[in-house]
Image (cartoon, grey):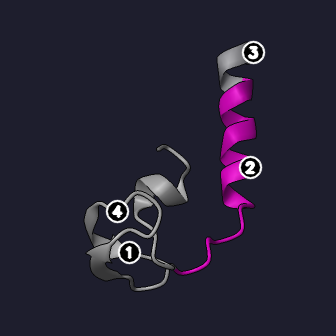
């Protein structure tokens, strides 16, 4: 007999198996972020990771 945790795990495994792959990220360049002005080793589209993720 399955419990709730087993059923949830089965649902999660099916969802992960059917997930579409993420698109590849741009290579990025080192420089100064256009939004916050901080130096970053990897800018994509001129923005650092925190600014791209809207964490600043």
Q: Quadrant of residue 5?
A: top right
On residue 43, which mark appears?
1
Q: CA distance from mark 4 to mark 3?
A: 58 Å
Q: Is residue 25 above or below residue 20?
A: below
Sequence-wise, the earlier of marks 1 and 2 is: 2
User: Marks 4 and 2: CB-CB under 8 Å?
Assistant: no
Q: Magenta: predominant secondary structure element?
A: helix
Quickly name the residue at label 4.
Answer: 37
Q: Residue at x 34, y 62 (%)?
A: 37
Quickly name the residue at label 3.
Answer: 1
Q: Badge 2: how crowded within 10 Å, few (<14), some, or many (20+)?
A: few
Dot in front, 1 or 4? 4
| Image spot of residue 49 (x, y percent) | 42, 60
| Image spot of residue 25 (x, y percent) | 50, 78
Q: Residue at x 68, y 58 (%)?
A: 17
- At mark 2, the secondary structure is helix
- At mark 4, the secondary structure is loop
Sequence-wise, the earlier of marks 2 and 3 is: 3
């Amino acid at each position: 007999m399955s419990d709730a945790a087993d059923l949830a795990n089965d649902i999660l495994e099916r969802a992960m198996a059917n997930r579409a792959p993420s698109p590849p990220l741009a290579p990025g360049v080192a420089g100064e972020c256009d939004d916050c002005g901080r130096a970053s080793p990897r800018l994509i589209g001129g923005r650092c990771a925190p600014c791209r993720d809207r964490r600043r």
